[in-house]
Amino acid sequence: MTWTDSIDIAIALDEAHPDFDPTFVNFVDLRKMVVALKEFDDKEDKSGEKILEAIQMNWLEERE
């Protein structure tokens, strides 16, 4: 997975953190959570606010 795989990342985050509420995650913590995923294979510094926001929104949608 790379930063552009926001839906796949959101699904993986939901599976890895089922009790976590993504509504209140800040982007610094979200970046750390994504990089910690075993399926993730990209450079940490390649993400920006728009990418992290897309991941957060997809994660929220995954919860619904």
Image (cartoon, helix red, strand yellow):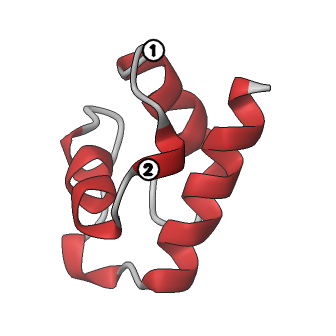
Observer able to see residue 26: yes
* Residue density around tag 1, few if under 14, some if 14–19, many if 20 or more, within 10 Å: few
Q: Please name the residue shown 26% across and 45% down the image.
A: 33
Residue found 44% across the figure and 32% down from its top: 13
Q: Which mark is residue 18?
A: 1
Q: Which is nearer the eye, 49 or 40?
A: 49
Q: Is residue 43 shown left or right of residue 9? A: left
Give percent across and percent down for residue 26: 34, 62
Amino acid carrying mark 2 in the image: Phe
Label 2 neighbour load within 10 Å: few <14, some 14-19, many 20+? few
Residue 16 position within the rendered picture, expressed as x and y whole percent measured from the top left: 37, 20
Q: Secondary structure at mark 2?
A: helix
Mark earlier in primary sequence (2, 1): 1
Labels 2 and 1 touching (C-beta < 8 A): no
Residue shown at the point (32%, 49%) measured from the top left: 34
Q: Nearer the viewer, residue 57 or 41?
A: 57
Q: Is residue 55 left or right of residue 13?
A: right
Residue drawn at point x = 48 percent, y = 68 percent: 52
Q: Which residue sits furthest front? A: 24
Residue 56: which disc?
Answer: none
Tell me the quarter of the image containing the C terminus.
Answer: top right
10 horizontally vs 63: left or right = left
The reply to whether residue 5 is visible in this rendering is no
Q: What kind of residue is marked 1?
A: Pro
Residue where numbered disc 2 is placed: 24
